[in-house]
């Protein structure tokens, strides 16, 4: 099997705290260190250097999904949260490596509070990138990451309308899941079926690399182990796909790699075929 992605990573709940205990436990089951560690941060919480420094010290790539759950987009652009933003800019500036920051994830989905006003999101995005630039934070990389489908599926809410421009985005990313029987209206879908159309839309926006910033498969409705093998095999069909990041949580369904022994073995067997993770 030819696997062309550069990095394989995961989000593990509480995985990057307490000396990466949760992340390391998954890696022990997989028999290989993951290349990338993903976690979520709310704008209601102060910048925490502990997980960032631990991830970088271990040679992993940090990806932080940064979510303003209670902060209005217009207030962000107006500078009402600048003191808070500067603590993040300075914290990342002082980190010993490159940091991938993913603000406003899945902005074309109606389940997030920053959905619905593309112009306001673009303005807030520009305010963020400008502030970080003014603070001298040159080791940040901006990850723009819509959902694979626009919800609602209206012309106004198309993912393209939220794009701030390739001069403000280092990575184009997607979220997309195989829901299987947990959502019968969607059903069981292969990785390439999930990504094909949004990947084409994304790559028309700019020349940046593409990441699958969130993906996983249910066990319900099909063969999860085969789905995992198919995901890695299909990566070769998308030449700009640089990273696959698994969402490893038992949430709406059991998305975890270790939801079954067969799924775990399938994921681990592919990882064993990859080169050593990049420093």
Image (cartoon, grey):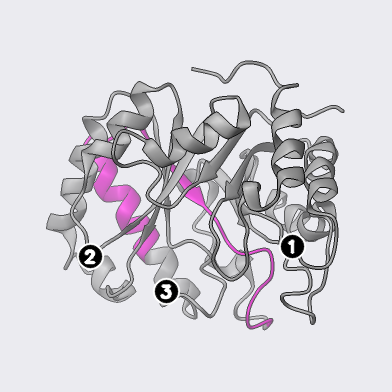
Please give the label number shown on residue 178.
1
Taking the spot 63% from the left edge, 83% from the top edge, the residue there is 152
Query: Is there a contact, CB below 8 Å, between mark 3 and mark 1?
Result: no
Rendered position, 54 above or below 155: above
Q: Earlier in the sequence, mark 3 or mark 1?
A: 3
Please give the label number shown on residue 44.
2
User: Which residue ends up furthest to the front in the rendered image?
Assistant: 261
Q: Residues within 10 Å of mark 1 (few under 14, many from 20)?
A: many
- The residue to which callout 3 is attached is 114
Query: Is there a contact, CB below 8 Å, between mark 2 and mark 3?
Result: no
Q: CA distance from mark 2 to mark 3?
A: 15 Å
Q: CA distance from mark 2 to mark 1?
A: 31 Å
Which is nearer the eye, 152 or 233? 233
In the image: residue 15, left or right of residue 240: left
Task: Give the structural element (helix, strand or loop) at label 1.
Answer: loop
Q: Which residues are magenta?
A: 124-153
Q: Nearer the viewer, mark 2 or mark 3?
A: 2
Q: CA distance from mark 3 to mark 1?
A: 24 Å
Q: Residues within 10 Å of mark 3 (few under 14, many from 20)?
A: many
């Amino acid at each position: 099997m030819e696997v062309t992605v550069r990095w394989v990573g995961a989000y593990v709940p509480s995985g990057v705290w307490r000396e990466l205990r949760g992340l390391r436990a998954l890696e022990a089951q997989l028999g290989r260190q993951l290349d990338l560690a993903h976690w979520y941060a709310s704008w209601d919480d102060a910048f925490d250097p502990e997980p960032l420094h631990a991830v970088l010290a271990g040679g992993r790539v940090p990806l932080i999904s940064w979510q303003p759950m209670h902060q209005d987009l217009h207030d962000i652009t107006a500078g009402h949260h600048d003191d808070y933003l500067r603590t993040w800019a300075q914290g990342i500036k002082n980190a010993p490596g490159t940091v991938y920051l993913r603000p406003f994830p899945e902005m074309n989905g109606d389940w997030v509070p920053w959905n619905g006003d593309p112009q306001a999101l673009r303005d807030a995005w520009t305010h963020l990138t400008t502030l970080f630039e003014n603070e001298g934070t040159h080791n940040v990389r901006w990850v723009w990451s819509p959902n694979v489908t626009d919800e609602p599926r209206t012309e106004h809410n198309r993912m393209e309308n939220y794009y701030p421009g390739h001069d403000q985005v280092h990575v184009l990313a997607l979220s997309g899941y195989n829901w299987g029987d947990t959502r019968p209206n969607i059903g069981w879908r292969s990785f390439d079926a999930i990504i094909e159309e949004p990947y084409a839309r994304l790559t028309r926006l700019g020349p940046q690399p593409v990441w699958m910033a969130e993906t996983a498969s249910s066990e319900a409705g099909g063969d999860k182990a085969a789905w995992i093998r198919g995901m890695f095999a299909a990566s070769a069909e998308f030449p700009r796909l640089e990273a696959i990041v698994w969402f490893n949580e038992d949430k709406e369904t059991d998305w975890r790699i270790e939801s079954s022994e067969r799924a775990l073995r399938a994921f681990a067997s592919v990882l064993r075929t990859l080169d050593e993770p990049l420093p």
